[in-house]
Amino acid sequence: MQIEVRNLSKKFGRVSAVDHVNFEIEQGKLIGLLGPSGGGKTTILRMLAGLEKPDAGEILFQGNKVNHLPPQERGIGFVFQNYALFKHMSVFDNIAFGLTVQRKSKSEIRDRVHEMIELIGLQGLENRAPHQLSGGQRQRVAFARALAPSPQLLLLDEPFAAIDAKVRKELRTWLREMISRVGITSIFVTHDQEEAVEVADEIMIINQGRLEQKGTPWQVYKEPLTPFVAGFLGESNLLHNPAHIVGFESAPRPHSEKARVLIRPEAIEVGREHEISNLSAAALGIVRSVQFRGSVWQVEVEVGEHRLLAHRTLEKETLLPGEQVAVLIHSLHLFHDEQSLFLENELKRANTRAI
């Protein structure tokens, strides 16, 4: 199902939960709605499902406006974060519920439920009650129940929130593979950026009821359009002025107090002088802390008036707190006057040209 949303708005009292949101979703895409709690993600999902009525705007499925349609006529499957399984029903009967409502024949129901049970990998558990299943198994049953009636759109509201971290990682991979096999357009709400980046084809970052940016996880991470997106997705250093950073002295000097500079930790090279690739483009700094982060060392380094987080590969010797080091900032993002600029270290570029 192809989806289009035009100027969608919803208020609760004086609070704008969703504020003139526009987006399109292609058929078969798995989309992550990502943002802080209270940002409007679930309200958008509920309006798509018909569980909330928009104050303004249009929702179109396959080019047809569906604002007036009740939930049961929109061709939607919905998965809630608390599973919402019927406690008195078996796994089989939970999955069959939507098919029963559709008045399918017993043979159709039986065949479809067995197909779903095979899809979610719970063969042999058909007669168990929900309380006899693990959290991950219950969520798989919830997925199967939503998919059994063959919806055109699958909506998932924080689908992994009630599951422990290890099982949550396993279910992410499983969900992506399952959606790919079924080929259904899907939208899931999450505030976990790692989850969204790992699972989604595209992410939409929602903040204070507005759509800040939409794109692939890599596009949004590499080319953030707003300071909020830059600070929310991935690790970053947010500063106010690039003019005092070595190699960026001629960068635009924003006059607005809202202007921000973003520097990703992986864009900062920190080490002893003989380790730095282009020493003339670097500044001196003092190491304040070093932490092991699994795949890298995270180094907090003080450079002038700034404290920056940088990444250092594990292959290099550990730096020590209090040690003087060279700090080379390769690139940064500057946000000002509604613009997003990607800037590279000028001294580094000049030295490269000279060579």
Image: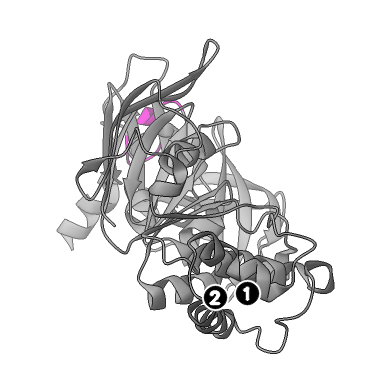
Q: Residues within 10 Å of mark 2 (few under 14, many from 20)?
A: some
Q: Which of 121 and 191 is in front in this view?
A: 121
Residue numbers of the magenta segment: 240-248
Q: Residues within 10 Å of mark 1 (few under 14, many from 20)?
A: few
* Mark 2 in CB contact with mark 1 (< 8 angstroms): yes
* Amino acid marked by disc 2: Trp
Specify the quadrant of the image occupied by residue 227. Answer: top left
Q: What is the residue that sits farthest to the bottom in this orientation?
A: 124
Q: Is the magenta stretch mostly helix, strand or loop?
A: loop
Q: Where 176 sits versus 228, above or below?
A: below
Badge number at residue 170: 1
**Residue at the spot x=56%, y=86% of the render?**
118
Q: Where 102 sits versus 181, above or below?
A: above
**Tag 2 residue:** 174
Q: In which quarter of the image is the C terminus?
A: bottom left
Q: Nearer the viewer, residue 328 or 91?
A: 91
**Residue at the spot x=41%, y=61% of the render?**
151
Badge number at residue 273: none
